[in-house]
Image (cartoon, grey):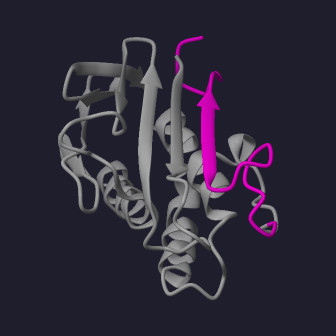
Amino acid sequence: MVITFQFTVRPGQGAPSGFDMGDMLVTGALGTANSSGHVPDQGMMIYLSVVHLLDTLGRFLQGDARVLSYIGVDTSFKLVVRRNKDGLSVAGKDGVIARATVPELASAVLRAAEELGRSLPQEDPVASDWETVLTAFRPLVPTATRRRPSARPSSAGVNGIPGVGTAFVKDTFPGSAP
């Protein structure tokens, strides 16, 4: 199974801030959900939206609710995660994007969040919420699939692009089909 999350900060906003606008892209074997390129605009306060995603998804994965309906901060962009007999399904407004196991989904979201977080200054007002939610979410990801978070570079981001975080998961986890 494959699921990819990408969180990006929109350019032209000055120095990185926890209140920056950005976009979320989720890609799976069955489709894509993307907040960019819509009228009306579906861009969101990306750092706060990722904090909200980690918080609500973490509680959902640890609980027994059947459906999680997630809407980003200051946007109409929506994802729906459903439990089913085979694991989880992730859907956007156009339908199911991917089917995944809990470890696959949690790993994909965590990796993208950790990449994006490298561009958030530690002195930013959102940074403490960011670190708190990441600390709470990390135990949901199996140790073998976790990457140790590295120190935040200045604002280099990924491949020198500030504010870009991506995650790609194509692994086999205990209890999942190859």
Q: Quadrant of the C terminus?
A: top right
Residue 141 visible, this angle: no
Query: Between 91 and 84, which is closer to the camera in this rendering?
Result: 91
Query: Between 91 and 6, which is closer to the camera in this rendering?
Result: 6
Query: Between 135 and 97, which is closer to the camera in this rendering?
Result: 97
Report which quarter residue 63 is drawn in: bottom left
Would you say the magenta stretch is mainly helix, strand or loop?
Answer: loop
Report which quarter residue 156 is drawn in: bottom right
For image coordinates 47% across by 37% down, the residue present is: 105
Location of residue 170 in the rendering, given as x and y in whole percent from the top left corner: 63, 21
Image position of 31 with respect to 35: above or below: above
Location of residue 88 in the rendering, given as x and y in whole percent from the top left corner: 33, 29
For image coordinates 33% across by 50% down, the residue present is: 43
Report which quarter residue 59 is drawn in: bottom left
Residue 63 visible, this angle: yes
Please tell me whether residue 51 belongs to the stretch shown in magenta: no
Q: Left or right: 2 with respect to 87?
A: right
Q: Left or right: 161 with respect to 6?
A: right
Image position of 31 with respect to 18: above or below: above
For image coordinates 29% across by 52% down, the residue present is: 60
Location of residue 154 in the rendering, given as x and y in whole percent from the top left corner: 80, 70
The residues colored magenta run: 153-178
Location of residue 132 in the rendering, given as x and y in whole percent from the top left corner: 52, 77
Please tell me whether residue 163 belongs to the stretch shown in magenta: yes
For image coordinates 45% across by 20% down, the residue present is: 28
Q: Left or right: 78 with respect to 142?
A: left
Query: Between 175 and 99, which is closer to the camera in this rendering?
Result: 99
Total of numbered circles in the picture? 0
